[in-house]
Amino acid sequence: MAKIPTAAVAASGLVGGYTAARVTRRRELGGVVLAAAGAWCAREWARAAGPATAAGLLTVYVAGFGGSHPLAKKIGSWPAVLTVTAVSAAASYAVADRRA
């Protein structure tokens, strides 16, 4: 079975969480999507690069979610989500996916 890149799942969690919250108008549903993807990624990051690296990447992921809110006030919602998604996915690829 092909390995799913954590960068793709992290990106899906951020974009999917935002989309789910926006479409359903239920912020908690977006949080569920974000948390599920983050938990899966954290497990895979720990397997691929160790728990310290997983903690660092999870921090980038969660900080991206939090940082997208003030960033959205400056550049708009979708540009903010896509910006933090790109940062999180790039970090995930560079630190964990490239090793596998």
Image (cartoon, rainbow, N blue to C red):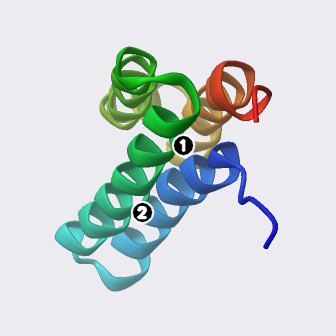
Residue for point 36% across, 15% down: 52
Residue for point 71% across, 59% down: 4
Q: CA distance from mark 1 to mark 2?
A: 10 Å
Helix, strand or loop at label 2? It is helix
Does residue 47 lie above or below 92 as drawn? Answer: below
Name the residue nearer the viewer: 61 or 74. Answer: 61
Q: Amino acid at mark 2?
A: Gly
Quadrant holding the C terminus: top right
Mark earlier in primary sequence (1, 2): 2
On the rendered structure, is 27 left or right of 100?
left
Does residue 83 lie above or below 16 as drawn? Answer: above
On the rendered structure, is 56 left or right of 2?
left
Residue 45: give x, y in percent of width and height. Answer: 50, 36
Residue 84: give x, y in percent of width and height. Answer: 55, 31
Q: Which residue is mark 2?
A: 17
Q: How many circles with numbers are drawn on the protein? A: 2
Outermost residue toward the bottom in this view:
24
Q: Amino acid at mark 1?
A: Val
On the rendered structure, is 47 left or right of 38?
right
Q: Residues within 10 Å of mark 2 (few under 14, many from 20)?
A: many
Q: Nearer the viewer, mark 1 or mark 2?
A: 2
Residue 48: give x, y in percent of width and height. Answer: 58, 33
Q: Which mark is residue 81?
A: 1
On the rendered structure, is 13 left or right of 99?
left
Residue 39: give x, y in percent of width and height. Answer: 34, 52
Say which quarter of the image contains residue 88. Answer: top right
